[in-house]
Image (cartoon, rainbow, N blue to C red):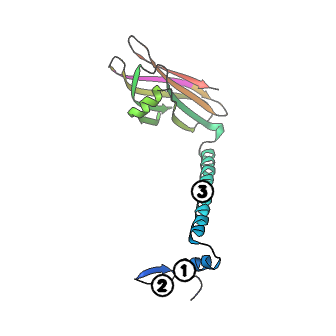
Amino acid sequence: MVAGAQQTVTVGRQVRVAWPVILVMMVASQLGLTRSAFAESLDQEIDRLKADVADLSQTLYQLEENVLYPVDTQVAVFLTLRNREGLDLDSVELYLNDTPVASHLYTDQERDSLKQGGVQRLYIGNLPHGAHQLKAVLTARSANERFVRREATHQFRKRPGESRIQLSLDAAAPDYEPVVSFQEWK
């Protein structure tokens, strides 16, 4: 047999076995390993490889984030609900310098998460230093069952380093009129 050749052998009732498998089984039997000990060592090796793959995946993700979103030009926009009972959010559209950058339709589960105090990252991207405009368009159903659509704009200056902007929604009794506010995090 030529080294590296992929051949199969018919064993018993037409079972085809590849030469490398037979070789591994012969080596294992020569070493005196029982089938369970051999399987256990393979399981340990597989677990080690899975852990290595997970570590490499995390490292790759971090490198990708650094390349795609350098800290010096990074802008992130987050959404929170101030009054958690005043609005049932349907959708949010986000525009940066009149260019659409994010759009999201909410599921019941996502609405519940926001009502429990969750924070949603609506957008992350890069901007050059200088003046910019952020516009949010939201549609929702207020606690008094009215459908509402609101637009709000926010002028801000991008400075070196990370910029984080919080978009907060509020709708207080008795009229439940939505109020959109922006806050820049330092």
Q: In this view of the protein, which residue sits in the foreground, 91 or 134?
A: 91
What x and y, as percent, mark residue 147? 33, 22
Q: Which residues, given as a range, are shown in magenta?
A: 147-155
What x and y, as percent, mark residue 56? 62, 54
Task: Point out the frontmost of discs 3 and 1.
Answer: 1
**Residue identifier under label 1:** 22
Magenta: main secondary structure: strand
Q: Residue at x 57, y 77 (%)?
A: 25
Is 152 included in the stretch rendered in magenta? yes
Question: Alpha-carbon neighbours of circle 1 within 10 Å: few (<14), some, or many (≥20)?
Answer: few
Quadrant assignment, res 28:
bottom right
Of the numbered discs in the image, which one, if any, rests on residue 53? Answer: 3
Question: Alpha-carbon neighbours of circle 2 within 10 Å: few (<14), some, or many (≥20)?
Answer: few
State whether residue 57 is above or below residue 106: below
The first of marks 3 and 1 along the sequence is 1
Q: How many numbered discs?
A: 3
Q: In this view of the protein, which residue sits in the foreground, 4 or 176?
A: 4
What x and y, as percent, mark residue 136? 46, 27
Of the numbered discs in the image, which one, if any, rests on residue 9? Answer: 2
Q: Residue at x 43, y 23 (%)?
A: 151
Q: CA distance from mark 1 to mark 2?
A: 9 Å
Label 3: element kind: helix
The first of marks 1 and 2 along the sequence is 2
State whether residue 116 is above or below residue 7: above
Contact, mark 3 vs mark 1 (Cβ under 8 Å) = no
Quadrant assignment, res 84:
top left
Q: Amino acid at mark 3?
A: Val
Is 108 included in the stretch rendered in magenta? no
Quadrant assignment, res 161:
top right
Contact, mark 1 vs mark 2 (Cβ under 8 Å) = yes
Classify the position of the N terminus by image quarter. bottom right
